[in-house]
Image (cartoon, helix red, strand yellow):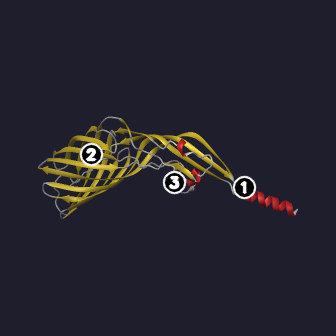
Amino acid sequence: MKHLCALLLGSILLVGCGYTSHYAHVEKFEMETPAAPEIRGAGNYKEPNTANVRLSANVHAGPQDKEQLHGLRNSMDGCGDLTRCRGYKPEEVKEKVDGTYKIMYPYVEASLDYISKKDLFLWGFTFALDKGLYSSLILGINTKYFEVGGSLGMWMYFRKFNYSGTTYDCDTFLSSDRLDKYPFESSNGMGTVITYGGYASTYYGPYSLNFSVNIYRPDPSYPGDDDDNVSRSSGTISEFDFPLVVTGYLTAGYRINENWEVRLGASNIVGELPGWHWGATGGFSYYTK
């Protein structure tokens, strides 16, 4: 009986020495990349120590281009438990990533802006429906004939993100291990990004001209990769920065009366990707007193 117990205990300890490293290595992706929302200040001279609300509706038109991205590499260097697996061969890992951005313009957008001015300084916040939910804070200065400012926001938006690659499993038991490889495909439909940028406007009488730039870097999450479920020896390998997306707007506005304004202009999507992607934008705004 004593020998049997020792044998059972030894078996349990030996089984406990085995583990599996499981990694999904991204090698190809295609992601919808929409134009970021426009950044706006007051749009005209605002009297000090006043505040108001602006409601806006806009339409956008532009191309849906696919741009092949260059220079993306997905390294396995941080996966020591996998790279030490006996069957692992670094020369067989496809580190070059075949990435594509699908440039697109949201068709419609609605926003609410709260704008307040204290002496020379302007501040406000924005809530918008633009392929999802967008909110931002603006800070700037507002003078008699021009204004400038910056913005920081968060955008939770719907977009298609399809990605694929190779799954690596390293099963380790005592002094032996086995490396298994097989392809995978997956997708994700929701993204959350931080946006930042700035604006500059000039105005005279009922006319105004606004230029703005809004920037974000896609940072997708992967199903099952939240901190509660993934250990150091499992997860999705995506060790590269997705290229920046920069959206510029140049719009002209005409103030019909104290409350209503119409706007028309051009937009452009550029950034760390090939080409320029021009679009058109227009809409109207209602200002509360």
Which one is earlier in the sequence, the residue at label 1 or at label 3? 1
- Residue carrying label 1: 15
Amino acid under label 2? Gly
Where does the image place residue 256, in percent across and percent down from the top left? Answer: 16, 45
Where does the image place residue 3, in percent across and percent down from the top left? Answer: 86, 61
Q: Residue furthest right?
A: 1
Where is 272 relative to 114, above or below? above
Eye-nearest disc, 1 or 3: 3
Q: Residue at x 52, y 41 (%)?
A: 165
Where does the image place residue 73, in percent across and percent down from the top left? Answer: 44, 45
Amino acid under label 3? Gly
Circle 1 residues within 10 Å: few <14, some 14–19, many ≥20: few
Amino acid under label 1? Val
- Residue carrying label 3: 78
Eye-nearest disc, 2 or 1: 1
Is label 1 in a helix, a strand or a loop?
A: helix
- Residue carrying label 2: 248
Residues at badges 3 and 2 in contact (C-beta under 8 Å)?
Answer: no
Q: Nearer the viewer, residue 257 or 115?
A: 115
Q: Nearer the viewer, residue 28 or 228?
A: 28
Q: Nearer the viewer, residue 82 or 154?
A: 82
